[in-house]
Amino acid sequence: MRVLITGGAGFIGSAVARGFISQTSDEILVFDKLTYAGNLDSLALIAQNPRYSFRRADICDRAQVMRALTEFEPDVVMHLAAESHVDRSIDGPAAFIETNLVGTFTMLDAALEYWRGLPKGKAEAFRFMHISTDEVFGTLGDEGFFREDTPYAPNSPYSASKAGSDHLVRAWRETYGLPTIVTNCSNNYGPYHFPEKLIPLMILNALEGKPLPVYGRGENIRDWLFVEDHAAALMLVARRGIVGQSYNVGGRNEKKNIDVVNTICDILDELRPKESGSYRNLITFVTDRPGHDLRYAIDCSKIERELGWRPKETFETGLRRTVQWYLDNPAWWQAIRSGNYRGERLGQIA
């Protein structure tokens, strides 16, 4: 199988790319603009493999997308390229509209032309996979779960742009017959995570002795999914997913943000103890983010039941692996912290 992965130098995309090369005989083409969150160092382990290739290009550039499709001739397009940080979407929503909506339209438009030109057998086997988020569903109360048929109710510019892109994918299937599949995942974490997100930010701030900023009182709840488990789910959907279906991918690990941060501190106290006191002493509560959804939780029983996927990591084992990876790989994150992102607060409304 030949797989074109947009956003393949990003956090989730690079995990998918590494998974394909290390676990299958498939060929992949990573298509990535290399914005601030794209990092070729995350692909270093597979960069010399003959089944891996890379193209630096923008998903909004239709000519480049079309060239990649016609030259690489993928059986599957896995569309992960997106602006993905809620706080950044509050500061600058235009980039999210451009990449997540216009970029997805461009991918669909080019993929449709490519698919229509394929011989019958290859056309029947072709799949366009769109990887999305549980944030499109809005927020939950104390009970209940997001299911594949949960109505969309996005609350941030980021989630609105992803909801719009999901709807475009559905429309291209219903109107033009393009064979599409959508997945919606819960919060990912793990190695190679750009340190603007909660878990890597807390780990690195703690190691540098900086405050650990927790929004509000840390009561917001997320379902945490280890990135390699997510990658395994996406690889499975690429092979066995049914056209026209959507699949929710979650970790069944609901945790309050404050509990996540406390657990990180406890692991660091064990693995890299401070000279005095606990890392918990660095926790600082800060003004909450605008439009901060209270709770996300995914019902992933469909992908478990129909495709046989199960996460391998518990939150405890996955988080320990994540902390250990950041301890073992300072060169990866120090290059980021010394460059275009130093852990500053984003997403405040003046």
Image: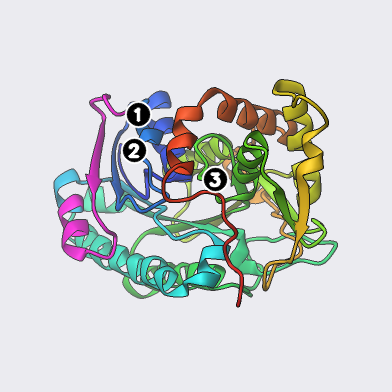
Image coordinates of residue 49 in percent, x first then y, are 27, 24
Q: Is residue 115 left or right of residue 206?
A: left
Q: In which quadrant of the rendered image does the N terminus lie? A: top left
Q: SS of the residue at dot 2?
A: helix
Image coordinates of residue 89 in percent, x first then y, are 51, 68
Q: Is residue 26 magenta?
A: no
Q: Nearer the viewer, mark 1 or mark 3?
A: 3
Q: Earlier in the sequence, mark 3 or mark 2?
A: 2
Q: SS of the residue at dot 1?
A: loop
Which amino acid type is shown beneath numbered disc 1? Ala
Which residue is under mark 3?
A: 195
Image coordinates of residue 254 in percent, x first then y, are 77, 48
Q: Earlier in the sequence, mark 1 or mark 3?
A: 1
Work out whether residue 303 can be spotted. Answer: no
Which amino acid type is shown beneath numbered disc 3? Pro
Which residue is under mark 1?
A: 44
Q: Is residue 59 left or right of residue 86?
A: left
Between the C-alphas of marks 3 and 2, the distance is 16 Å
Between the C-alphas of marks 2 and 1, the distance is 7 Å
